[in-house]
Amino acid sequence: MSFGTWLFTRLHGELVGTDSFGNRYYVDRRNKGKKRERRWVLYKGAPEASKVPPEWHAWLHSHVGQPPVQGSRPKPWQKPHLPNLTGTSQAYLPPGHTSMGGHRAKATGDYEPWTPA
Protein backbone atom coordinates (compact mmCIF):
# COMPACT_ATOMS: atom_id res chain seq x y z
CA MET A 1 0.00 0.00 0.00
CA SER A 2 1.36 3.39 -0.94
CA PHE A 3 1.45 6.39 1.38
CA GLY A 4 -1.24 8.12 -0.70
CA THR A 5 -3.64 5.18 -0.37
CA TRP A 6 -3.00 4.97 3.36
CA LEU A 7 -3.58 8.72 3.81
CA PHE A 8 -6.76 8.73 1.68
CA THR A 9 -8.09 5.78 3.67
CA ARG A 10 -7.34 7.49 6.99
CA LEU A 11 -8.99 10.74 5.91
CA HIS A 12 -12.02 9.50 3.96
CA GLY A 13 -12.42 5.76 4.48
CA GLU A 14 -14.89 3.95 6.70
CA LEU A 15 -14.17 0.30 7.40
CA VAL A 16 -17.05 -1.88 6.23
CA GLY A 17 -15.64 -5.33 6.94
CA THR A 18 -12.90 -7.89 6.48
CA ASP A 19 -12.78 -11.24 4.74
CA SER A 20 -11.24 -14.58 5.68
CA PHE A 21 -7.92 -13.59 4.05
CA GLY A 22 -7.58 -10.47 6.25
CA ASN A 23 -8.35 -7.99 3.43
CA ARG A 24 -10.12 -4.84 4.67
CA TYR A 25 -12.94 -3.21 2.70
CA TYR A 26 -13.73 0.50 2.83
CA VAL A 27 -16.31 2.98 1.60
CA ASP A 28 -15.79 6.73 1.15
CA ARG A 29 -17.74 8.31 4.01
CA ARG A 30 -18.25 11.51 1.99
CA ASN A 31 -20.60 9.82 -0.48
CA LYS A 32 -21.78 6.83 1.59
CA GLY A 33 -25.32 5.78 0.72
CA LYS A 34 -25.43 7.79 -2.49
CA LYS A 35 -26.03 6.29 -5.93
CA ARG A 36 -22.34 5.95 -6.77
CA GLU A 37 -20.37 5.00 -3.66
CA ARG A 38 -16.60 4.78 -3.83
CA ARG A 39 -15.46 1.39 -2.52
CA TRP A 40 -12.01 -0.14 -2.25
CA VAL A 41 -10.00 -2.90 -0.62
CA LEU A 42 -6.69 -2.89 1.24
CA TYR A 43 -5.05 -6.27 0.75
CA LYS A 44 -3.29 -8.15 3.49
CA GLY A 45 0.06 -9.12 2.06
CA ALA A 46 0.73 -8.89 -1.66
CA PRO A 47 -1.92 -6.97 -3.62
CA GLU A 48 -3.52 -9.76 -5.65
CA ALA A 49 -7.04 -9.17 -6.98
CA SER A 50 -7.84 -12.88 -7.05
CA LYS A 51 -7.67 -12.88 -3.22
CA VAL A 52 -11.06 -11.11 -3.15
CA PRO A 53 -13.84 -13.67 -2.47
CA PRO A 54 -16.90 -13.59 -4.78
CA GLU A 55 -19.25 -12.05 -2.22
CA TRP A 56 -16.88 -9.13 -1.61
CA HIS A 57 -16.23 -8.77 -5.34
CA ALA A 58 -19.97 -8.30 -5.86
CA TRP A 59 -20.02 -5.60 -3.16
CA LEU A 60 -16.92 -3.81 -4.52
CA HIS A 61 -18.50 -3.56 -7.98
CA SER A 62 -21.89 -2.43 -6.62
CA HIS A 63 -23.75 -5.56 -7.71
CA VAL A 64 -25.16 -5.78 -4.19
CA GLY A 65 -25.95 -2.87 -1.89
CA GLN A 66 -25.00 -4.37 1.46
CA PRO A 67 -21.64 -5.92 2.34
CA PRO A 68 -21.58 -9.66 3.07
CA VAL A 69 -22.64 -10.74 6.55
CA GLN A 70 -19.68 -11.82 8.66
CA GLY A 71 -19.85 -15.51 9.57
CA SER A 72 -22.56 -16.35 7.05
CA ARG A 73 -22.63 -20.04 6.16
CA PRO A 74 -21.96 -21.01 2.55
CA LYS A 75 -24.28 -23.30 0.65
CA PRO A 76 -23.38 -27.01 0.95
CA TRP A 77 -22.29 -27.15 -2.71
CA GLN A 78 -19.91 -24.17 -2.46
CA LYS A 79 -16.19 -24.75 -2.22
CA PRO A 80 -13.97 -22.37 -0.22
CA HIS A 81 -12.51 -19.52 -2.29
CA LEU A 82 -8.95 -20.02 -3.51
CA PRO A 83 -6.84 -17.21 -4.93
CA ASN A 84 -5.14 -17.61 -8.31
CA LEU A 85 -2.18 -19.94 -7.77
CA THR A 86 -0.66 -19.56 -11.25
CA GLY A 87 3.09 -19.12 -11.03
CA THR A 88 3.34 -20.59 -7.54
CA SER A 89 4.49 -24.02 -6.42
CA GLN A 90 0.84 -24.93 -5.73
CA ALA A 91 -0.35 -24.22 -9.30
CA TYR A 92 -2.28 -26.98 -11.07
CA LEU A 93 -0.24 -28.93 -13.61
CA PRO A 94 -2.10 -31.37 -15.89
CA PRO A 95 -0.79 -34.92 -16.26
CA GLY A 96 1.07 -34.23 -19.57
CA HIS A 97 2.88 -31.09 -18.36
CA THR A 98 6.67 -31.05 -18.79
CA SER A 99 7.14 -30.36 -15.08
CA MET A 100 5.16 -33.52 -14.34
CA GLY A 101 7.42 -35.69 -16.49
CA GLY A 102 5.85 -34.89 -19.86
CA HIS A 103 4.01 -38.21 -20.12
CA ARG A 104 0.28 -38.77 -20.02
CA ALA A 105 -2.00 -41.73 -20.49
CA LYS A 106 -2.71 -42.79 -24.05
CA ALA A 107 -5.89 -41.41 -25.60
CA THR A 108 -8.74 -43.89 -25.65
CA GLY A 109 -11.95 -44.21 -27.60
CA ASP A 110 -12.41 -42.87 -31.11
CA TYR A 111 -9.51 -40.41 -31.13
CA GLU A 112 -7.46 -40.46 -34.31
CA PRO A 113 -4.77 -37.85 -34.89
CA TRP A 114 -5.03 -35.91 -38.12
CA THR A 115 -2.33 -36.58 -40.67
CA PRO A 116 -2.01 -34.45 -43.77
CA ALA A 117 -2.63 -36.25 -47.04
Image (cartoon, grey):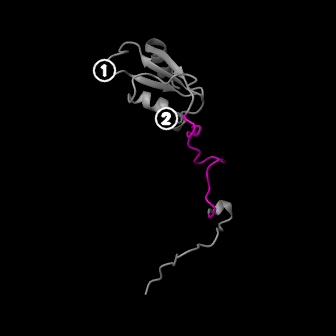
Tell which circle, 2 or 1, labels the residue nearer the N-terminal end. 1
- Residue nearest the observer in this picture, 110 or 30: 110
- 117 on left or right of 24: left
**x, y percent for residue 96:** 62, 64
> Would you say residue 93 sits in the magenta stretch?
yes
Residue 85 lies in quadrant:
top right
Residue 88 marker: none
Q: In which quadrant of the rendered image does the C terminus lie? A: bottom left
Task: Please provide percent x and percent y for residue 9.
Answer: 47, 17
Determine the CA span between mark 2 and mark 1. Answer: 22 Å
Q: Can residue 80 be found in the magenta stretch?
A: yes
For the view shown, which residue lies furthest in the left direction? Answer: 35
Q: Position of residue 102 (x, y in %)?
A: 65, 66
Position of residue 50 relative to residue 1, above or below, is: below
- The answer to whether 114 is drawn above or below residue 65 in the figure is below
Look at 32% across and 22% down and name the residue there.
Answer: 36
Q: Amino acid at mark 2?
A: Pro
Residue at figure coordinates x 45%, y 25% from the top left = 40
Judged by its main secondary structure, the magenta piece is: loop
Q: Which residue is mark 2?
A: 54
Tag 2, which secondary structure?
Answer: helix
**Three-letter amino acid code of the residue under disc 1:** Lys
Residue 38 at x, y = what percent?
38, 22
Magenta residues, as a range? 75-96
> Could you tell whether 98 is left or right of 51 in the image?
right
| Residue identifier under label 1 | 35
- Residue extending furthest right? 101
Could you classify mark 1 by the number of other residues whose Cα lies within 10 Å: few (under 14), some (14-19), or many (20 or more)?
Answer: few
